[in-house]
Amino acid sequence: MSGFRSRGGPSSTRSLQFFHFGHQCPHNAHLLARIQSFAKQEGIPLRVVDVSRDEDACERFRIFSPNMLLVNEKYRLHGPFSWERVKTMVDDEDIESEAYGINQSEDVVRGSLVPLTSQSVLSTCWPCMGSEDERLCKGKSEWVVTVTRSLGLEHLGYLHFYGGRCVGGAEFLPSESVPYPIPDKRKDNAFLTCSFVSDEKKDYKTYPMTRMIDDLGGLGFNTLSVAASRDVVFPNGPLEWFLKKGFADGGVLITEVLHKAEIHYLQLRLNKTKL
């Protein structure tokens, strides 16, 4: 499957399926709660799938992001969604959306770096959720505890602090631990699960990713891969930013029509880094 329809005729049966990669994304917990409340009030069947326990579902539905809501078996919605947005989709009303693109700045900021651990990740509530309430990132923190213990890792990357707040970061997992159907899951291939925040005025992403890459070689990794959109922010975009860092474009994984996101698979040879 290379693309999915963003508009269709009226659905005879309304349905919802919510796929999530555990609590890898801080949004996953509240999005799950929101769609469960919505489905109950609207009387719509809801199927919830944690793809960290069901890689077959990831393969079948071609999922390359930490959450996806499938509405009426045809509308694929990724990232934060509102109650109102889902209502228009289940009723086959106004389905179109605008692409969220950013011309990523090349003005690299170098603040302070902190290893991404279960404690430090609570600070991502500001850049990810727009809130200082660390309770919103509790699920993410618990996910980091589980993953680091199971993989024997001290941390999952680095968070970037500037001006007293977390402004970005880079998070990785061994590619074999990622449920997404990426081409080459190898012991020596790390996968960039999140690179943030994209910004038109400053580059907050280069500094933490550079430090993370410095660590990866010592952990036995020879390559770093990522799924990134060509033109829009979702997921990890824009692609051009990675190409300038020396990543090679491995081709299109999927085109998410609703988000106008052509998602590519990119890979960097760590001994040829030019960050």
Image (cartoon, grey):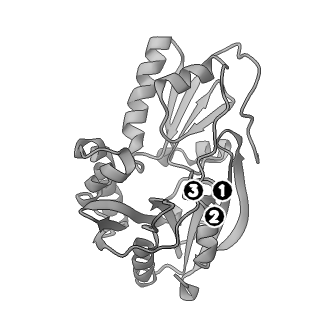
Would residue 183 be visible to someone looking at this image? no
Q: Residue 76: name its quadrant.
A: top right
Amino acid type shown at disc 2? Leu
Answer with mark 3 or mark 1, whichever residue precedes in sequence. Answer: 3
Instruction: For the residues labelled 3 and 1, say whether their Cβ atoms are less than 8 Å apart.
Output: no
Residue named by callout 2: 239
Q: Nearer the viewer, residue 140 or 196?
A: 196
Q: Which residue is mark 3?
A: 102
Instruction: Tell me residue 232's x, y (percent).
Output: 61, 53
Task: Please state which of the two labelled residues, at mark 2 or mark 3, is closer to the viewer.
Answer: 3
Based on the displayed image, in which of its 4 quarters is residue 247 positioned?
Answer: bottom right
The percent coordinates of residue 133 (x first, y second) are: 24, 43
Viewer-side residue, 17 vs 136: 136
Residue 217 visible in the snapshot:
yes
Please tell me which residue lies in front, 259 or 34: 259
Task: Give the residue pinned by disc 1.
Answer: 231
Horizontal and vertical percent position of residue 149: 30, 61
For residue 43, above or below residue 94: above
Q: Earlier in the sequence, mark 2 or mark 3?
A: 3
Amino acid carrying label 3: it is Ile
Q: Secondary structure at mark 3?
A: loop
Query: Is the residue marked by circle 1 packed among few (<14), some (14-19), or many (20+) residues within 10 Å?
Result: many
How packed mark 2 is, by other alpha carbons closer than 10 Å (few <14, some 14-19, many 20 or more), is many
Work out which quarter of the rendered image holds the N terminus and state it.
Answer: top right
- Residue placed at 47% from the left, 47% from the top? 21
Q: Quadrant of residue 157?
A: bottom left
Contact between labelled residues 2 and 1, with CB atoms less than 8 Å apart: yes
Q: Say what amino acid the circle numbered 1 marks.
A: Asp
The answer for how far apart the CA atoms under marks 1 and 2 are is 7 Å
- With 156 as the anchor, is 117 left or right in this view? left
Give residue 119's position: percent from left, percent from top: 22, 58
Q: Residue at x 66, y 19 (%)?
A: 93
